[in-house]
């Protein structure tokens, strides 16, 4: 059972545009929500993460928006670049489960020149 | 960020043989390491949680006798795929976290191909 639902499955954005990826969860025990970026043949790299006590976190061109009541969170990539083309995974974990990550199914992002 | 080293990056083996994959935290101590499996264009599926000095906890459906996990020190965990078969071919990725820290850092993965 997928504990974290992610959409869209794929996304095409023009260079300079905003990429938006959405995730939703059901387990209210989750207290840590990271986003990972993965290039083909490589392990995932931590991009940015948020805890449920804040509604937004920004690091450079990457912003997480978090809606605790709706149990949803999203990643916004501003000024998207071709080098951002990769697969993005949202995830969620909880202290009670030793912070084992539950991943969404991933979003394949293509940024066109 | 913290560095997790995983070796080998790619291995090809014959059916019936065993393969060992190493996962090392290079600049921090990791009491917990996780092993994931990923099929092409799919998400990462948690296989097991490895705790230093104790037996690993396997997820439902993962054969503990086929996927042997050892976490003998705070910086090293190993996954041994025993009697590998073609259906075990996959991308295996380890991750580790610093003590009492929720941030997980991933290794670069191991592509296993069983002929």
Image (cartoon, rainbow, N blue to C red):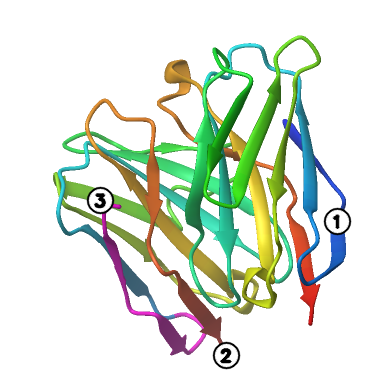
Q: Quadrant of the C terminus of chain A?
A: bottom right
Query: What residue is shown at x 46% (from left), y 22% (from top)?
Result: A97
Instruction: Answer yes or no: is residue A2 visible.
Output: no
Give the residues drawn in magenta, as a range.
B1-16
- Residue A9 is marked as 1
Q: Residues within 10 Å of mark 2 (few under 14, many from 20)?
A: few
Residue A65 drawn at (x, y percent): 69, 30
Residue A4 drawn at (x, y percent): 73, 34
Please state the chain letter of the residue tagged with numbered disc 2 in the rendered image.
B
Query: What residue is shown at x 32% (from left), y 46% (from top)?
Result: B96
Quarter-wise, where is residue A102 in the image? Answer: top right
Please state the chain letter of the residue tagged with numbered disc 3 in the rendered image.
B
Query: What residue is shown at x 86% (from left), y 62% (from top)?
Result: A11
Q: CA distance from mark 1 to mark 2?
A: 31 Å
Q: Identify the residue position indicated by label 2 in the image.
A: B115
User: In the image, are marks 1 and 3 on the same chain?
Assistant: no
Q: Is residue B4 magenta?
A: yes
Q: CA distance from mark 1 to mark 3?
A: 35 Å
Query: What residue is shown at x 46% (from left), y 58% (from top)?
Result: B66
Q: Identify the residue position indicated by label 3 in the image.
A: B70
- Element assignment for label 2: loop
């Amino acid at each position: 059972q997928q504990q974290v639902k992610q959409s869209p499955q794929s996304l095409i954005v023009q260079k300079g545009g905003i990429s938006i990826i959405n995730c939703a969860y059901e387990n209210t025990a989750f207290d840590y929500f990271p986003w990972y970026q993965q290039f083909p043949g490589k392990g995932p790299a931590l991009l940015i993460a948020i805890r449920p006590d804040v509604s937004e976190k920004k690091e450079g061109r990457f912003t997480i928006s978090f809606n605790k009541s709706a149990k949803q969170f999203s990643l916004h990539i501003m000024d998207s670049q071709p080098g951002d083309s990769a697969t993005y995974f949202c995830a969620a974990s909880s202290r009670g489960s030793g912070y084992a990550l539950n991943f969404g199914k991933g979003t394949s992002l293509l940024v066109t020149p | 960020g913290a560095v997790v080293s995983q070796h080998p990056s790619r291995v090809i083996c014959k059916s019936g043989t065993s393969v060992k994959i190493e996962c090392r935290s290079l600049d921090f101590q990791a009491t917990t390491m996780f092993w994931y499996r990923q099929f092409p264009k799919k998400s990462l599926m948690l296989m097991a949680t490895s705790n230093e000095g104790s037996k690993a906890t396997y997820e439902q459906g993962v054969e503990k006798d086929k996927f042997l996990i050892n976490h003998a020190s705070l910086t090293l965990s190993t996954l041994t795929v025993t009697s590998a078969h073609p259906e075990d071919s996959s991308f295996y990725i380890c991750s580790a976290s610093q003590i009492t820290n929720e941030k997980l850092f991933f290794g670069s993965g191991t592509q296993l191909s069983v002929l």
